[in-house]
Image (cartoon, rainbow, N blue to C red):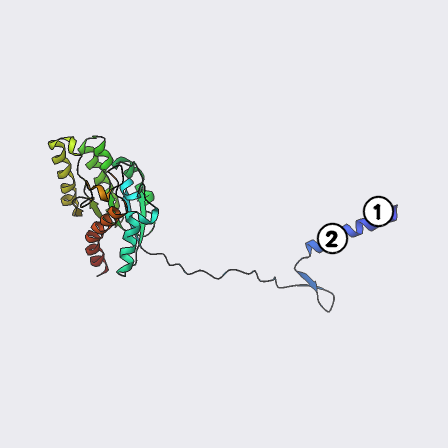
Amino acid sequence: MRKNLSVLLLALAALVMSACGAGESRNASGTNAQTTPAPVATPSPIPETSLPKIVAFGDSLTAGLGLPAAESYPSVLQKLLEQDGYKYEVVNAGVSGDTSAGGLRRLDWALEGDVRFLILELGANDLLRGQPVKEMKNNLAQIIERAKRRNVEVLLAGMYAPTNAGADYQREVHEAFQSLAREHKLTLIPFFLDRVAGIETLNQPDGIHPNTQGSRIVAETVYKALRPLLDKREQ
């Protein structure tokens, strides 16, 4: 029994020694010699092909509510840019139901990375809810100022107030976008839904959100205003 116990202890000791002595071997003279660790295989680095970003920042009109992702206006804009050889990544940062205040709260996240341009399309939900125009304008101004501090150029998309909002409210909304563009020296798209709003064949059944054809027209409207800014930046 004692002999068996001794054999067992010797076997355990041998296992411990072999574990502790990993990476060592004996040379011809019988002394310990440190062996070279086996090289660890590492994957070859993958070249990064990240492009500067154009962030489409807005509400459901930007998000593409009711459309496949590939048919949202930012996706169509991406294709237009690629067709003309512009090397940018268009990021769809649209959130359905968002207001100018909501956009202000999430702006820092949207501007992460190498963002060169911000297409600012917000305010429609503020107007549908009849919120004070002054409040909407203040939120948009803060978004613009914070983007410009990061050296991000802003393309401002204007909105019209609903026709049932009253003439005074409509004029106030129109002037708010015009004055934002003047005060901050921005390119303004006078009406984001130009040639689409109110046309039944270009909108989904809700009469508010563009369908596939309407989305393409919106993308063309944005691209027409954006392209001179791209050319100027690349000079």
Q: Is residue 114 above or below residue 129?
A: below
Local crowd at mark 2 within 10 Å, few (<14), some, or many (≥20)?
few
At 15% from the left edge and 34% from the top edge, which residue is drawn?
163
Q: Amino acid at mark 2?
A: Leu
Q: Nearer the viewer, residue 106 or 145?
A: 106
Q: Which residue corresponds to mark 1?
A: 5
Q: Is residue 9 left or right of residue 113?
A: right
The mark found on residue 137 in the picture is: none
Residue 200 seen in render: yes
Give the Cα distance between marks 2 and 1. 16 Å
Image location of residue 190, percent across then percent down: 16, 45
Q: Secondary structure at mark 2?
A: helix
Give the quadrant of the N terminus.
top right
Local crowd at mark 1 within 10 Å, few (<14), some, or many (≥20)?
few
Q: Amino acid at mark 1?
A: Leu
Residue lying at the far bottom of the rendered structure: 28
Residue lying at the far front of the rendered structure: 201
Q: Is residue 211 above or below residue 45?
A: above
Q: Nearer the viewer, residue 54 or 160?
A: 160
Q: Along the polypeptide, which appears first: circle 2 or circle 1?
A: 1
Image location of residue 76, percent across then percent down: 29, 51
The mark found on residue 15 in the picture is: 2
Image location of residue 152, percent across then percent down: 25, 50
At 69% from the left edge and 63% from the top edge, which residue is drawn?
25
Residue 186 seen in render: no
At 27% from the left edge and 42% from the top edge, which residue is drawn?
61
Image location of residue 66, percent across then percent down: 32, 41
Give the quadrant of the C terminus.
bottom left
Q: Quadrant of residue 14?
A: bottom right
Q: Secondary structure at mark 1?
A: helix
Q: Quadrant of residue 184?
A: top left
